């Protein structure tokens, strides 16, 4: 999965719904998230993600998130 830009909740639960559908087909699931182009997420989006991962932890074998950390020089 790839995340780009700012998530203000404009997509509702569609992203988590897609992951839920994949969990029905294949579990435990290894989820790889490319968040290098993500800017941030609204608090409501972050809270919903936290609830999802807390309740689905037994169906997820691994969640890996790729991020880029900006360094000041």
Image: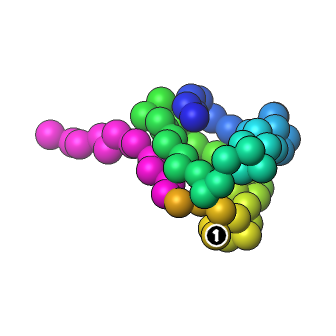
Residue drawn where x is 64% and y is 70% of the image: 58
Decide which of 60, 50 is in the foreground and name it: 60
Query: Residue 15: x percent and y percent?
Result: 74, 39
Percent across and percent down for residue 3 are 57, 33
Report the residue marked by disc 1: 58
Residue at the (47%, 36%) spot, across then down: 34
Q: Could you tell me which secondary element the residue under label 1 belongs to?
A: helix
Foreground pick, 66 / 68: 66
Percent x, y of residue 51 = 73, 66
- Counting other residues with Cα less than 10 Å from the Cα at mark 1, is it few (<14), some (14-19), or many (20 or more)? few
Residue 72 magenta-drawn? yes
Which quadrant is the C terminus positioned in?
top left
Question: In terms of depth relative to the viewer, which is nearer, 60 or 67?
Answer: 60
- Count numbered badges in the picture: 1
Residue 20 in view: no
| Vertical relation: 69 (above or below) 2 | below
For the view shown, which residue lies furthest in the left direction? 73
Residue 52 in view in this figure: yes
At x 52%, y 50%, the residue is 30
**Does residue 67 sit above or below 45 in this rendering?**
above
Q: Position of residue 59 (x, y in %)?
A: 65, 62
Q: Quadrant of the N terminus?
A: top right
Instruction: Examine the image and state in which quarter residue 69 appears.
Output: top left
Between 52 and 72, which is closer to the camera in this rendering?
52
In the image, residue 46 above or below residue 32: below
Does residue 37 appear left or right of residue 1 in this picture?
Answer: left
Q: Which residues are magenta?
A: 62-73
């Amino acid at each position: 999965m790839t995340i780009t830009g700012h998530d203000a909740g404009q997509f509702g639960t569609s992203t988590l719904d897609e992951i839920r559908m994949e969990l029905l087909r294949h579990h435990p699931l290894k989820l790889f998230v490319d968040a290098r182009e993500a800017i941030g997420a609204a608090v409501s989006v972050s809270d919903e993600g936290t609830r999802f991962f807390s309740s689905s932890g037994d169906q997820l074998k691994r969640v890996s998130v790729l991020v880029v950390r900006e360094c000041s020089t």
